[in-house]
Image (cartoon, helix red, strand yellow):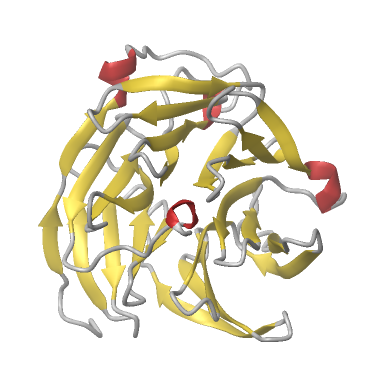
């Protein structure tokens, strides 16, 4: 029995085909993961103030930049596995690197340097995956690794602007996307192999309060991946391997089902465009970036805050 009526369906279009734009051919990753030739695996979309869209290509240690005219170029390449990416209001680019920890990219020099090395996260380091800045500059991120329902020990951290590192959760089955609500008193985490999106209250004293399930996802071979928040507190969720983005009202009711027009590996997403009503989605099976227009604008990213 369905608890909700079917959500309204929206169609996507291709914003840019990066496989075609970059001339990628199937190749082996230098990290040997995956161990079969792939052209790419797109992740981590994020916009800078000039309207450039940055995405990562984890198997090859690459960061790509798509300009507003839809031309694409290599912004950086280094020895790492960049996944999540967010841009600081300073213009610096912060990367959740599964191998190395949190890295920092200077978009001008294209130099990538350590910001929060994996050693700082202790012997239990698993592999960071995604990150989000709060308005005060605190950085929240997921430490995912290969955790799942057999080993629900994925972690969620907060790095405060004063350098203090807080372990918020240590029992998540594959923590993935992470986002704050507009009031920044609640944190949402995609538990891919839950499969569910968790929510936890952020208390004024810095602790987390009651933690629960915001929404669950039925079956299949994937689950919730990247997350994005709109200005009303509605949540958009990539459903990996289902070729779908679901959107939910602030109360958790399904609103839209956004179907991929190219491939099933919908991994991550970001709001952009002049009024932030366009949602951009990385699809990693075919190496494309999709777009769709939504009625409610996305929440301003930290890169765009004064």
Q: Residue at x 69, y 68 (%)?
A: 171
Residue 245 position (above or below residue 168): above
x%, y% of residue 45?
41, 43
Q: Tell me if 186 is positioned left or right of 166 in this view.
A: left
Q: Tell me if 76 is positioned left or right of 225 in this view.
A: right
**Quarter of the N terminus within the rendering:** bottom left
x%, y% of residue 248?
30, 73
Q: Residue at x 21, y 83 (%)?
A: 4
x%, y% of residue 73?
39, 20
Foreground pick, 117 / 223: 117
Residue 31 position (above or below residue 216): above
Q: Tell me if 296 is positioned left or right of 37 in this view.
A: left
Q: Residue at x 27, y 22 (%)?
A: 71
Quadrant assignment, res 127? top right
Residue 64 position (above or below residue 294): above
Quadrant assignment, res 111? top right
x%, y% of residue 236?
33, 63
Q: Tell me if 30 is positioned left or right of 42 in this view.
A: right
Foreground pick, 241 / 291: 291
Instruction: State whether residue 82 appears in this view.
Output: yes
The total of numbered circles placed on residues is 0
Name the outermost residue toward the front: 306
Q: Residue at x 59, y 27 (%)?
A: 33
Instruction: State whether residue 35 appears in this view.
Output: no
């Amino acid at each position: 029995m369905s608890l909700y009526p079917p959500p309204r369906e929206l169609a996507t279009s291709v914003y840019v085909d990066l496989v075609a734009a970059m001339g990628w051919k199937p190749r082996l990753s230098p990290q040997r993961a995956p161990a079969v030739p792939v052209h790419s695996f797109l992740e981590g979309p994020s916009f800078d103030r000039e309207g450039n869209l940055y995405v990562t290509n984890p198997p090859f240690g690459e960061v790509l930049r798509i300009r507003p005219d839809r031309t694409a170029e290599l912004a950086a390449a280094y020895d790492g596995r960049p996944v999540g990416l967010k841009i600081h209001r300073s213009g610096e680019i912060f990367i959740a690197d599964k191998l190395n920890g949190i890295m920092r990219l200077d978009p001008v020099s294209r130099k990538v340097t350590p910001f929060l090395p994996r050693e700082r996260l202790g012997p239990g380091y698993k592999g960071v995956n995604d990150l989000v800045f709060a308005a005060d500059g605190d950085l929240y991120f997921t430490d995912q690794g290969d955790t799942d329902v057999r080993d629900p020990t994925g972690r969620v951290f907060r790095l405060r602007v004063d350098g203090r590192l807080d372990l918020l959760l240590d029992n998540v089955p594959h923590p993935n996307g992470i986002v704050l609500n507009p009031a920044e008193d609640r944190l949402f985490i995609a538990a891919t192999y839950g499969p569910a999106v968790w929510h936890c209250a952020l208390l004024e004293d810095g602790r987390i309060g009651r933690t629960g399930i915001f929404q669950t996802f039925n079956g299949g071979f994937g689950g919730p991946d990247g997350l994005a928040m709109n200005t009303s507190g509605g949540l958009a969720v990539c459903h990996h391997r289902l070729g779908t983005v679901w959107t939910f009202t602030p109360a958790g009711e399904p609103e839209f089902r956004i179907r991929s027009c190219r491939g099933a590996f919908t991994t991550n997403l970001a709001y952009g465009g002049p009024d932030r009503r366009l949602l951009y989605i990385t699809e990693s099976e075919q190496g494309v970036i999709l777009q769709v227009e939504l009625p409610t604008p996305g929440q301003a990213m930290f890169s765009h805050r004064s």
